[in-house]
Amino acid sequence: MTQEPSELAAVCVQEVQRLHRVIVDWTTGAVPDTDENFTPFAEAFAPTFAIVNPSGEIEGVDGVLARFRERHGERAGRQFAIRITDEAVRDLAGDTALVVYQEHWFHGAQEQSVILASALLRADPNRPGGIAWLHLHETWLRPPA
């Protein structure tokens, strides 16, 4: 069943927020290192997912999942946070949306870096948040110092 465009846009923005909360919880060790806690991240991505990292490297889903699994607790005790801003759904086509947003990374109260991201997302009721991540392209607006 296809969602209404405004509903799909809202769900996509919610998914961007959700996934980044999962990233923070995992990398700070706020959740235990279990398959159950890894699943909300791992199952968000389509099998063909690819990311273009801010450095320009292209990485497929297998690499992303392996790298992220290893990062559990790497920011433990550091008051790490990601704030998502400037979310905009740029294009909707059927059950697919292009979402642009900024990621502001904080350690304590100090902003460390800012990333501009463009994510291609598709409605998928079998994925966490009801969305599958198809492609993500990130660009530094302000790299970490």
Image (tube, rainbow, N blue to C red):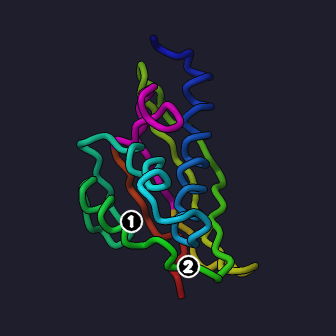
Say which amino acid is labelled 1: Phe
Q: Quadrant of the C terminus?
A: bottom right
Q: Is residue 33 magenta?
A: no
Please tell me which residue is depicted at 53% across the width and 36% down the height of the picture. Answer: 129
| Residue denoted by label 1 | 68
Instruction: Classify residue 105 by image quadrant.
Output: bottom right
* Labels 2 and 1: the sequence-earlier one: 1
Q: In which quarter of the image is the N terminus?
A: top left
Looking at the rendered structure, the secondary structure element under dot 2 is: loop
Query: With respect to residue 116, does 93 lie above or below?
Result: above
Question: Can you give x and y, in whole percent of width and height, for residue 23 in the image?
Answer: 52, 61
Please tell me which residue is depicted at 29% across the width and 46% down the height of the picture. Answer: 49
Query: With respect to residue 136, does 34 lie above or below?
Result: below
Q: Label 1 neighbourhood size at 10 Å, few (<14), some (14-19), many (20+)?
A: some
Please tell me which residue is depicted at 25% across the width and 42% down the height of the picture. Answer: 47
| Residue denoted by label 2 | 75
Say which amino acid is labelled 2: Arg
Question: Can you give x and y, in whole percent of width and height, for residue 130 in the image?
Answer: 49, 31
Please tell me which residue is depicted at 53% across the width and 50% down the height of the picture. Answer: 19
Magenta stretch: give its range.
116-134
Question: Can you give x and y, in whole percent of width and height, for residue 112 in the image?
Answer: 61, 80
Is 24 placed left or right of 67 in the picture? right
